[in-house]
Image (cartoon, rainbow, N blue to C red):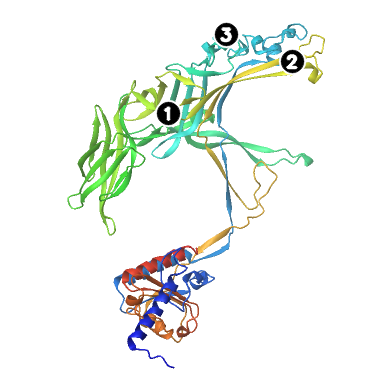
Amino acid sequence: MMMKILRRDITKVFALLLGVMFLLSLSGASAGPTYIVPTGLKDISNVPKSFFVRPDGTPNVKIVIGSYARAEDVASAADIAAALGSILYKEEEAKNIAIKLRKAGETDVVLEQVIYRYDYETMTVDHDLPYNSALVNWSKSYDELPADYWFNGASYAGNYSTWAGSFSAQFKVKDRDSVNGNELYGWDIEIHKLSLLPVDPADWNGTAPPKQADIEIPSRGIVVSVDYTLYNYTVKKVKVVREAYPEWGVPEETVVVNESRIGNSIDVELDNGTIVDVISPGIEAGDEFTLLGTKYHVFSVGSGSFTAGEVLGTDWFAQNESKPLGNSRWEITLIGADPLQEEAIVTVKDTKTGEIYGPVILKLGKPEDVVVSGDTVELQLKLEALSENLILGKIAQISGYGNIKTYSSGTYVEYNGQKWVISVDSDGKYIRGISMTNEDELIGNPLDILGIYTIKYSFDMRSLNEKDVNFDINRDGEITDTSYVIAKATITVLDNNPKIQELVVSVGDRIPGTDYTISGVAGVKNIVLKTPTQPIALLDREVDLTNPTSNYILVGSNKANILTSMIFGHYHLPVDFRVWFGEYPVLGYIPHCDLLNGRGVIIVAGATPEATREAATILMQYIAGLS
C-alpha cells in the first residue's frame, strides 16, 4: 500500500534533513572555532602546507575574489594574502655560520682582601717564629686564636684596631658610564674606612675575627668618581713579525707598536697608556649622560654646578590611551590633539600616589613643567610630533624628563635608597667629572653599594689532627691525637652586574681554552624568504577553468563569487547560506576539484560579509600554525 505524501510534508522532511546536515556539520567543531563545513567537503584541518606553498617557497595558491564582492570580502582576501606571507620561504643548509660564545665576565670579584690570617706561613714569615719553639703554642680552638694576625697594610702582624684604622681599598672599572650613548667612561672607587660589627657581641672580645659580623662603613667612607674627559691614547703592544724556529736556531722577532684607544683617565691608567690628545673635554648642555647607570639630560652647565633631569623616554600615545612614559611612575592619557594648532591635551597620573594632574596643554616643541615641587621639576613633558593614524586616529609623540634640578657640590642624591653627596667639577661649559660619597652610614653583610656592588665579610676556620696526617704539626717532637686550627677572614667586593664577554667563532676555528675545533654545525637552516613576483589575488572571471595553474582560495558567498556558485552547483551543495547556515562562517576543502582540472579549493564564505570575514580569520589562524 502506497503512502500519499503531501507537498507540505515534503517541505517538512527536506527541512528536517537539512537540519540534520546542519547539526552534523557542527559536530566535532565544538571544541574549536565554530564554523560550517558543507556536507561533501572536507574540514580545513586536512589541508596540507603544500596546498599553499611550493617546495621552493613560492606561492602555490591564488585568492579569488567575487565580481560582486563587498568591501569586507576584499579585506578578507587581503588578510589571507598577508597570512600567506608567513609561510612563503625555503629552508636551505646554512653556510658560513658564525657562533657567538658568551660567558660572564671574569671580574665578578673586583676586590678580595684577606684581613686576618693565622696559619703556618703567617707564623713563620710575618711573625718570624722559630720552628721548634714558638709553634708549640699553635692554637687548638677559636678561643685561642691570637689577636695580632690582622693585616696592617704590609703583613699579618697587627691587631684589630690597627687594621680598622688603616683599612683602605681602591679599584677601578672600565667602560661603565656613557655620554650620548658612548659607554667609554670608567669608575674609580675608594673605600677609606671599614669596621666589623659582630652579630653576637657577647661572642667576640675584639681579638680574633668575629665568626659572623656586619660590615660598617661610616659616613664619607666611600668615594665613587667618574671622569668625563675623553682621551685618545696609545698602548704599547708587542707584535710578532717572525715566529721562532728553534730547530734551526732562528729566534722570534718582535716589534713594539702603539695601539690607539679611546677612554677616560681610568682606561688610560688601567691600560698603562699614554695620552695623545683630548677628544672631548666633558659634558655640554644638551648632552645626555649616565651617572652610575642613571641617564640624565643636561639643560645647562655652570661653574661647579649643572642643571639636569632624568631621561624618562619618548613614546607615541593614541587618543584616550593611558600608559606609562617609559619605565617611570607617570601615566599619561592623551585627551585630545589638534595637528593644525600643533597642540595636545593630556592628563598625568602619579601611579605611586594616585594623584592626577591636568588637563595640560602641550605645544609642539615647547617643554612644559607639569609637576613642580620646590626647586625640583618632578615631571616635564614635551610634545615632539603629531599625526593621524587610520586605525588609532590622532596620535602624539611625547618625551619626558623627571627630577630636573641644579646639582652642585654638596647636593644630596639618592641611589638605591642610600643618601650620597656629590662634588661637581665643571667650568661653566663642560662637566669634567663628578664624584659621590656616602652621607649615610652603611651597615650589612652582604652590604649593598649603590645597587652596583656587594661587599661581603666571611670567616673560615679549619682544624687538622696530627695523627690523621702522621706529622708533628706544632713541632714539639711528638705526634699526638691533637687537632690544630688555622683561620682566615676576608672582605670581598662583588660586581652585581658583571660584563658579558662575547667571542665569535666560525667553522674551522678552535674553541678557546680547549682542544676542540668546530668542524660543522648540525640542524641549522637558513630561511630564504620568497616574495611573490606576480599577483596572488584575482577576480572570479579571470580564472582559466581549462588550464588552472595553482590551487584556489575562493572568498565570498555564491551570491558574490561566480566560481563559488559554480562549485556549489556542481557538487549539489546547499546554496542559500542565509537560510541554511545563518550567521555562521563557512569553510570547506576540496582536495581535487573536477571543475578546476583536479586543483585544490578552499571555500571561505558566509551568509553575510561579517561571517565571511570571520571565516577568513579562522583560515589565517590555520595558516599561521603551518609556519
In the image, farthest residue toward the bottom:
1
Q: Residue 487, position in %: x, y?
A: 65, 17
Identity, as a three-letter code, of the amino acid under mark 1:
Asp
Q: Secondary structure at mark 2?
A: strand
Q: Residue 250, position in %: x, y?
A: 74, 40
Q: Secondary structure at mark 1?
A: strand
Tag nearer the camera, 1 or 2: 2
Q: Quadrant of residue 235?
A: top right
Task: From the viewer's side, name the closer residue of 526 and 259.
Answer: 526
In the image, farthest residue toward the left:
341
The structure residue drawn at horizontal position 43% and vertical position 63%, both measured from the top left corner, is 621
User: Which numbered marker is on residue 227?
Assistant: 1
Q: Secondary structure at mark 3?
A: loop
Could you tell me if the residues under marks 1 and 3 are in contact, i.e. CB atoms within 8 Å? no
| Spatial CA span between label 3 and label 2 | 23 Å
* Labels 1 and 2: the sequence-earlier one: 1
Q: Quickly name the residue at label 2.
A: 483
Is 545 left, or right, of 356 in this rendering?
right
In the rendered image, the vertical position of residue 337 relative to residue 221, given as above or below: below
How many numbered circles are shown?
Answer: 3
Q: Quadrant of residue 484?
A: top right
The structure residue drawn at horizontal position 65% and vertical position 37%, both measured from the top left corner, is 254
* Residue 12 appears in the figure: yes
On-image quarter of the N terminus: bottom left
Is 446 left, or right, of 513 in this rendering?
left
The structure residue drawn at horizontal position 42% and vertical position 84%, both measured from the top left corner, is 572
Mark 3 surroundings within 10 Å by alpha-carbon count, few (fewer than 14), some (14 through 19), many (20 or more):
few
Mark 2 surroundings within 10 Å by alpha-carbon count, few (fewer than 14), some (14 through 19), many (20 or more):
some
Task: From the viewer's side, name the closer residue of 71 and 532.
Answer: 71
Mark 1 surroundings within 10 Å by alpha-carbon count, few (fewer than 14), some (14 through 19), many (20 or more):
many
The structure residue drawn at horizontal position 53% and vertical position 39%, both measured from the top left corner, is 500
